[in-house]
Image (cartoon, rainbow, N blue to C red):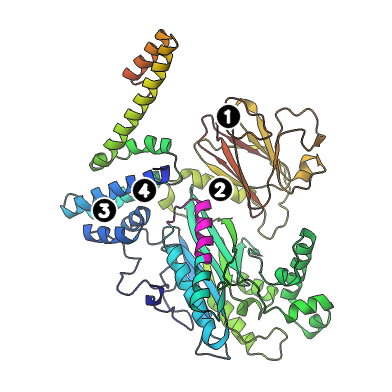
Amino acid sequence: MNAEEYRKKLELDILKIIEEKLRNGQMDVERARSIARMVLDRLHPPLTLEQIYQIAPTLDDHFAELAAAILPIAHEQEERVKTIVTEHAQKLIKQGKIEEATSVMKQVTEKKVV
Amino acid sequence: MADNISEIPKGPPQEGHVGKVVFPTKEGEAPRVEAIHTAESIQAALAKRSPDQVLEMIAGQENPLSLKSFGSSEASIKHPDRDEDAIAIDMRSGIAMVFDGVGGATDGDKASRAARNLTAERLNNIPLNTDPEIAKNSVRNALQEASQKVHTEVPGGGSTATVVKFIESGGQRRAIIGQVGDSRAYILRGDSLRQITSDQGLVSLAKLDKPDEIVEQKRIGLKLDQVATPQDLANLTAQERYFWDNRNLIDKMVGDETIEPQIYQVALQDGDRIILTSDGVHDNLTQAEIDRIVKSNPPDLAKALTEKAKARSQDASHVRHKPDDISAVVVDVEPRGQASAGRVEGNQINRFDQQQSAPPDGEKPTQTEKPPQVHDLQGGKEITLNYEGKPIKVILPAGQVLEVGDPRNLNIEGSDLDGIIIDRSDLKTNDLRRNEFGYKGLREGEKVILGRLSPGRFRFGTEVSRQHLEISREKGQIVIRDLNSKYGTKVETS
């Protein structure tokens, strides 16, 4: 999935949340409008995947009901970084750079890399 | 299907044209200006529209780009019951278009309507926040698709097309204009009226395709636009008279099996006015008359233009008199209110454009000494600049500098390029010769992505990102865009 498809998927997920909350009476029209305006402003194309990963976690800052759409992305980003770092650490270990590998892994566990 | 779309109201513009939909939606479909606010309406909208468009509808942005429109179409006095022109305006989805049917009594109106309906459907579906490059391709594709449809369904007919999709990208409102044939798009900026599009008629007729011949064609075109008296006509040379006598002819139209529409992009400023006309307007009126009417600022400019042109078409004693269908569409770019406050970067760029842009009529900007201004594009921002005059300095990390400008001002010996980017970081002398230093020529409509991934002749430092910035040349202006580079891009202008 390219960045634009990913951006649209995120918008679609948010729309489904709005639709469901409106249907269940858990959201009023004014709030739906505010969310739509915020999403249009922040997810303004063109965006790279990296930018989407950076922006997505901010979308539920003021609209907690969007968390359901945001969490999978945050999780995905975390997994992606883990994979990259693990591969990097394995490479360092194979090269005998144990201390460097340990340092990289420590940074991840202390959330310095993510 | 397009046939389900009802016709544009004919005759004088109706009350309510301003800023509202005049291109009807499909039968049974709710008017698009209605915001949606129920789960069911979201579901229904999602079946037809992109997530961006549905969000725009929920946001209730009835006129999200702050555009105001006017439209008027008058049938020819020769056939007052059959208007072979077709127009469409929808500021909700940012479209404005004029089509002029070709093919006579049975086919001209069918062709223009078929072309309009399909093009409008396609352009309606381009989200307002589309990237300009994507929008350009979409406009081109829409016109090509319309051409195939007309070619198949109305084999005896064709149509000119001047269509505009308004978008907003990076906080900058833009007009993406597609052109086939001899309908026109103009821009009024400040006190200057300029024709944006080039007629696709004279050039092809005369096979003028070299730069000096195109200049000659433009000169002739401008001269013909000013013919107002029998004496003016008598003063034309034989070649000019040939063009005058054949000014009705076009050799590119929507309806040809294949077409290559001309695509233009204009970065809009507050107060700009985009004006589309069919040749019923600009053949009946001189350029000076159009200029005068536009600058007289009538309450409904589209109506004023078509009424004046119609009056001329009825005056058989005038050399320009030409009974024809007459159409005009006008879109005003209104100043943005607080609604756009969330896109601060764009507002900054708009302000900069207003200070730096050349007058739209192509006159050189007034040369006043100002201290250099540095514009930080970090984070994917872009800036649109004129490249004439002093070179624009693009400052990359670690002090590496590119200069962008007209080669005549960059001292490139033997360059036949009319736009160029130079890497000055290793520059020892001002006496540049081709192939000695990094350079990239940039012709109209071209763009280049610069960075370590594709260095070409440039020598980039390690601080420069793999894809660092994009530079494009559009409509005589240079657009510089940072591609979310790690250490950013700055632009220095005098």
Structural distance between the alpha carbons of marks 1 and 3: 45 Å
Q: Are marks 1 and 2 in contact (CB under 8 Å)?
A: no
Mark 2 touches mark 3? (CB < 8 Å)? no
Q: Are marks 4 and 1 on the same chain?
A: no
Relative image position of residue B346 (x, y in whole percent)? 50, 46
**Distance between mark 4 and mark 1 Cα atoms:** 30 Å
Residue at mark 1 = B464
* Residue type, label 3: Glu
Query: Could you tell me which chain the residue with mark 4 belongs to?
Result: A
Q: Nearer the viewer, mark 4 or mark 2?
A: 4
* Quarter of the figure that contains the C terminus of chain B: top right
Q: Is residue B118 visible?
A: yes
Q: CA distance from mark 4 to mark 3?
A: 23 Å
Q: Chain of mark 3?
A: A
Query: Image quarter for residue B405?
Result: top right
* Label whose residue precedes the other's in the sequence (1 or 2): 2
Instruction: Identify residue for label 2.
Output: B351
**Is disc 1 in the same subunit as disc 2?**
yes
For the record, the magenta segment spans B127-144
Amino acid at the residue labelled 1: Val
**What SS does tag 1 mark?**
loop
Please name whichever residue, B165 or B69, is drawn nearer the observer in this view of the structure. B165
Where's residue B357, x and y in %? 64, 51
Q: Chain of mark 2?
A: B
Mark 4 or 3 closer to N-term? Answer: 4
Q: Identify the mark at residue B454; answer none if there is no mark.
A: none
Q: Residue at x 41, y 73 (%)?
A: B2
Can you identify the residue that label 4 sits on?
A8
> Circle 3 is placed at which residue position?
A30
Which label lies toward us, 1 or 3?
1
Amino acid on which the number 4 mark rests in the picture:
Lys
